[in-house]
Amino acid sequence: MAAVLGLGLSHYPPLCLPDEEMSGILRWTLEDTSIPAEEKDVANWPEPMQAEWSDDFGARAATGHRASLVAGFDRVRAALDAFAPDVVLVWGDDQYENFKEDLIPPFAVLAYDDLDLRPWSHAQASSMMKGQQNVWGEDESKHYRLRGRSDIARHLVGELIARDVDVAYAYKPLHHASVAHAFTNTVLYLDYHRTGYDYPTICFPINCYGRRVVSCEGFVTRMDDPLEFDPPSPSPKRVMEVGAATARVLKESPWRVALVASSSWSHAFLCDATWRLRPHTEADRRLYAAFRDGDYDAWRDTSLAAVEDAGQQEMLNWFALTGAMEELGAALDWSNFVETHIFNSNKVFAVYAPG
């Protein structure tokens, strides 16, 4: 019998690193000569940010941040296991990994069959792991046999197109040996304790990076880098509509489906308003309050310009989830906001009551 579970989590790449390396993005940003020296002066930072940074570049704070994130993943994984889905559908971003100059689809369903997912060889650069040791001490031999459900993916695409959602689809990777790090890390973190991950999974990338997906190769730049921006990503409202349409199709199907939003919230390296030194916590808190209260209109009325100004591009994955949960009338069962000033992004975890 059809049932749908909504989940939200982060695919924060530095969680793969040892604690002493977790603040690496901020340390790289502090070398940017185009950022005023007074903004980079630790003495001028907000007190909570100074406390996290401390005298060890955040190593001790990273231990606590990791514990909070692992607890969130454990809660989400427990809900997933209790639900026992036929398939897991993950909304995530492709940061110039599988889709590059020859094709940038706004939305795509990857209708893959089973494939080998090798986290430490397939996505080294995009997941910030090139030349790095991971926290599990794993080498390139580590792999998952990531199971697909191409039958469900094809059904979803056909039904979305029939409902005037012109979604792209693919049967095999284009520029990537498996799947982008938004999806790879979702698997790694749901299996943080290495007990196994055997759920068939459909990846549903959204062009979250929009203007920066090719021009910045979906990653960090210096503030004064000359850039010729790309066309924009879909609007938050449109992403919610696609999320809602996806939920309708799957609710009418015979399958049990877990819908997962995979991303952190505002990203420091995308936020000029904070000189790219810290996430836009104020904007995140506003959206989180609306999320917790089920104020879907506040999400729908959020402009793409506001999302970009706050460095919340990857949150478009969460806009898909909120659209789906509004469509289903799902109740938010649990959520948690994990705040940080130095670890690039605030993170949110969520579990909706299945229905």
Image (cartoon, grey):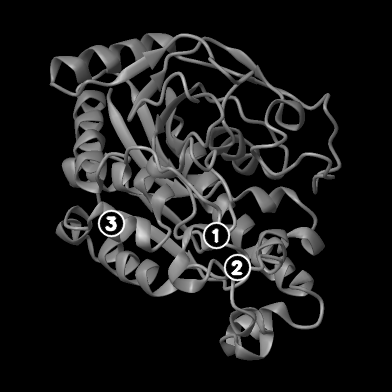
Mark 2 highlights which residue?
Answer: 34
The amino acid at mark 3 is Ala
The vertical placement of 265 against 89, above or below, is below
Asked if marks 1 and 3 touch (Cβ < 8 Å), the reply is: no
Instruction: Find disc 3 in the rendering and name its residue.
Output: 305
- The answer to whether any part of residue 280 appears in the image is no
Residue at 63 percent of width and 55 percent of height = 70
Task: Please state if 120 lies on the left or on the right of 234 as rendered.
Answer: right
Q: Is residue 137 left or right of residue 19?
A: right
Q: Position of residue 313 (x, y in %)?
A: 40, 50
Q: Earlier in the sequence, mark 2 or mark 1?
A: 2
**Label located before the other in sequence (3 or 2):** 2
Residue 320 is situated, as x and y percent measured from the top left of the image, at 30, 41
Tell me if label 3 and label 2 are in contact, CB under 8 Å.
Answer: no
Residue matched to label 1: 224
Could you tell me which secondary element the residue under label 3 belongs to?
Answer: helix
- The quarter in which the C terminus is drawn is top left
Which of the 4 quarters of the picture holds residue 256? top left
For label 1, the crowd category at 10 Å Cα-Cα, with few meaning under 14, some 14 to 19 and many 20 or more, is few
Residue extending farthest front: 226
